[in-house]
Image (cartoon, grey):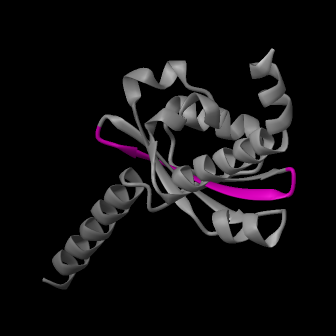
Amino acid sequence: MEKKRLLDLFLIIVVLLIVFGFFGVFKKTCDNEECFRNGIEKCKNLVYFENKDGNLLKYSVSNLFGYCVIDIKMERVRGGREVVDLLEGKEMKCKIPKKELSEINSNMETYIGYCNGVLKEKMYEFVLKKMYGVVIGNINDILDEIKV
């Protein structure tokens, strides 16, 4: 009787480990972009930290029922207080159909259309503020061009 209980407990643990592994509870940590790129192509459960110009992004990839889900979090932002307040700690989720993964690579510009969340909204807000600043800074030149 005791052996049967141990066997049942063992089987339950094995099944839980398989389920947790399938749903991405256990994730490999990539230490380079090549590992990350290969992981996205195959939609492997992984975590990758990218340091880009002093900005630290955390990518967490999960395989989920026909989709490759990439959670992106801006861990650290380099820049002035306004930029830090706008972007740091913000997240977005990208849900890419697996059949379209061959067209996607690890470059965010190729899959940003599949993303939703505060980080995406704030990145667009930041870009618009910069563009607005450029237009205002050159308003006299623009008006001179219109008068001609």
Q: Point out the residue furthest to the front here.
A: 147
* Dominant secondary structure, magenta: strand
How many numbered circles does the render carry? 0
Q: At 46% from the left edge and 55% from the top edge, which residue is drawn?
A: 117
Left/right placement of residue 118 relative to residue 147 reads: left
Whether 64 is among the magenta residues is: yes
* Residue 90 higher or lower than 115, as above or below: below
Q: At 63% from the left edge and 37% from the top edge, which residue is drawn?
A: 108
* Residue 20 higher or lower than 30, as above or below: below
Is 128 in front, or is 146? 146
Q: At 65% from the left edge and 63% from the top edge, which residue is drawn?
A: 87
Residue 21 falls in image quadrant: bottom left
Q: At 68% from the left edge and 45% from the top edge, which residue is drawn?
A: 127
Left/right placement of residue 26 relative to residue 148 reads: left
Is 142 in front, or is 114? 142
* Residue 62 higher or lower than 15, as above or below: above
Location of residue 82 in the rendering, given as x and y in whole percent from the top left corner: 74, 68
Q: Point out the residue furthest to the top here.
A: 148
Is 146 in front, or is 22? 146
Residue 63 falls in image quadrant: top left
Q: Which residues are magenta?
A: 53-65
Whether 75 is among the magenta residues is: no
